[in-house]
Image (tube, rainbow, N blue to C red):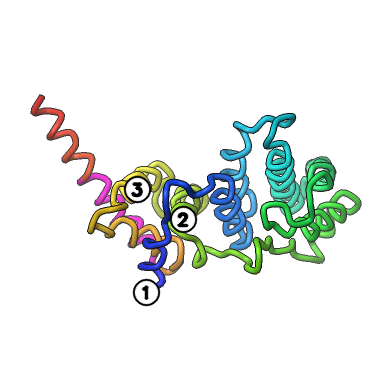
Amino acid sequence: MTDSDRGVDDAGSDSADEIDVALAAGAALFNEGYVLAAHDPWEEAWLPLDADGDAAADERLLHGLIAAAAATHHARSRNWSGAVGCAGNAVEYLGAVDATARGVGVEPVREWCRRLAADPEAIERAAPPTIRIGDSTPGFGDLDLPAALLAAPVLAGEIDSGTEATLERAADLARDERGTARTTVTELLFAFLRDPETRPQVAARLADRVELADRKRRDVDDLF
């Protein structure tokens, strides 16, 4: 079984926890160097949560990670005041959760943000920590299908290969493939994430698949 085949098989079931999926997708983006982009899947999972409800711990964890990503981005951009403010928020939110909340290694991220809050120019002397979940440090090659479907459109929005809208539509097509014998779009999405050298070509093939699917849908609609 290939890695891509394994990703399809492990895509999981609809019972996959949306927060865990978002955490994995964001961690992979962060660890692969797309720090601000990690904000997107985390924010999508965070927005519906009630800070005072049953999911308060998840709300604080996601809020802290979002702030940590923003702080790191601001520091890289030499926006020192923005980095200090966001880092302070991250320390506050991450200080209110367990050190292994949702399996995330919280303490290195919190320590990094403490450092940025005190000295944002530290970014010029040290790299941000990688984000660990359980025993792994997720990268694009480690994502299962649900997390890959979140990460791929966000990545497209960060690079000059494909468009976020096209990759979002391709993600919809990959979801439609689940439970069928078709895996073409799914395999292309995994390739888009995992092989930077071929991303332009893969993005073009995904765009063709999206256009074909949309054309077929329009043809069917025209029949009625």
Q: Is residue 35 left or right of residue 214?
A: right
Q: Amino acid at mark 1?
A: Thr
> Which residue sits at x=68%, y=37%?
55
Q: Quadrant of the N terminus?
A: bottom left
Q: Is residue 184 left or right of residue 136?
A: left
Q: Amino acid at mark 3?
A: Arg
> Which residue sits at x=54%, y=51%?
21
Q: Nearer the viewer, mark 3 or mark 2?
A: 3
The CA span between labels 2 and 1 is 16 Å
Residue 201 belongs to the span the image colors magenta: yes
Q: Quadrant of the C terminus?
A: top left
Q: Which residues are magenta?
A: 198-212
Q: Amino acid at mark 2?
A: Ala
Q: Position of residue 53 (x, y in %)?
A: 70, 30
In the displayed orientation, state which residue is furthest to the top. 224
Asked if the residues shown at circle 3 and circle 2 are in contact, with their CB atoms under 8 angstroms apart, the answer is no
> Which residue sits at x=41%, y=46%?
163
* Disc nearer the start of the sequence (2/1): 1
Q: Return the mark for residue 2.
A: 1
Q: Return the mark for residue 148.
A: 2
The CA span between labels 1 and 3 is 20 Å
Q: Return the mark for residue 175.
A: 3
Say which element carries label 3.
helix
The CA span between labels 3 and 2 is 11 Å
